[in-house]
Amino acid sequence: MDGYLGIIVIVLLVALLAAGGMFLLFRPRDRHAPPVPPSEAPALREEERAPATGVVEDDAATTTVPPPARPVEPVAPAVPAIEIPPPSAGRLVRLRARLARSQSALGRGLLELLSRDRLDDDAWDEIEDTLITADVGVAPARAMVEELRTKVKVLGSRGHDEVRALLREQLLIQVGADMDRTLHTTPHGERPAIVLVVGVNGTGKTTTTGKLARALVGDGRRVVLGAADTFRAAAADQLQTWGERVGAEVVRKDEGADPASVAFDAVSKGIEDKVDAVIIDTAGRLHTKTGLMDELGKVKRVIEKRATVDEVLLVLDATTGQNGMRQAQVFAEVVNITGIVLTKLDGTAKGGIVISVQRELGVPVKLVGLGEGPDDLAPFDAEAFVDAILGD
């Protein structure tokens, strides 16, 4: 019996060994086995090599090999298209609605006061206060009130049209409808007109310089711009953008360069190229900085070694009111101001600064800024300004 059991055990052991050998012989190939080194890999027959189409096939999957990437060619910076601005003539008339929105409150208030059945001393004081609040100035306001009182006494009964005519007449007198507001930007023979733009930081001086160049190009003039605000690299970059848009060349130097040197080179370039006008943007200076103000005088003197300065335009922010008057007085002591540019006139109800600044400096407002658009700088027209205040 024990012999039979021994034989059965031996047979079972042989069977198990045979089964294990068959499993090892026919087990599936491990796809995660490490790759065969190139030196040990068998060479592929011609028909087994990857086709030229970039597709490699095996018994389990098809892999697409992407073509080699093409080298990226450098892209040249886009050259801005040259714009053709509209002419400057008639701009203030076109922008009258915008001006009226900010200034008509003054006109309505004055018309309402003057249309009262009875004008006593308190009413006239209120009219004077309204004018002073609008930055007309104390002396001009009193002069207007005295003249209006005299006219009203003579006129007697007053209708709306009569009151409006009286007020219009007085406003035109105070605004200076007869002042010469010619902007001297025409060349003198072989020499271009030279325009120097000055002003305090934040008044919109560099933007005004660019807009003025745009207006002159719209009138058919050729312009060179001088970026003499060398204390701010952003100012030169901003002016460069304005020049590129209308095809005006900009003369500039590195930040910190001598402003007078930049101005001199710009004038020289204008003479060489025989352009119509050279516009110099100076650094925005605080009027309390005596040294910087002296430097502005130096810029003007250096320019005059090559050409006469035809215009010195002082840019004032209309929203600063009487503070702008103090700025104007200091600049007038350093350089001979020939005209005023009032910016942001559409954003204030104090348009009376037109009257006070002209009275104080004895020079006319020649340009006004009525918005942020590139063509929102307009030649000042006294009649259009007064009509906008009074409304239709």
Image (spheres, rainbow, N blue to C red):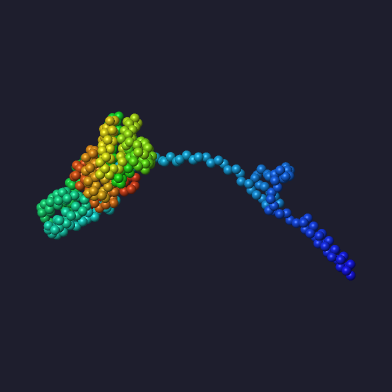
Looking at the image, residue 50 sits to the left or right of residue 368; the answer is: right
Residue 277 versus residue 384 in the image, above or below: above
Q: Position of residue 160 (x, y in %)?
A: 18, 56
Q: Can residue 280 be seen in this view?
A: yes
Q: Where is residue 288 in the image (x, y as percent from the top left)?
A: 25, 44
**Residue at image point 12% right, 51% down:** 146
Q: Quarter holding the N terminus?
A: bottom right
Q: Is residue 186 visible?
A: no
Instruction: Tell which of 159 and 196 is nearer to you.
Output: 196
Q: Residue furthest front?
A: 2
Q: Which residue lies furthest to the bottom in this view?
A: 1
Residue 99 versus residue 335 in the image, above or below: below
**Residue at image point 23% right, 44% down:** 328
Q: Where is residue 109 in the image (x, y as percent from the top left)?
A: 21, 56
**Residue at image point 65% right, 49% down:** 63
**Residue at image point 37% right, 43% down:** 234
The quadrant holding residue 261 is top left
Residue 113 versus residue 255 in the image, above or below: below
Instruction: Tell which of 150 and 191 is nearer to you.
Output: 191
Q: Where is residue 103 in the image (x, y as percent from the top left)?
A: 25, 52
| Tag count | 0
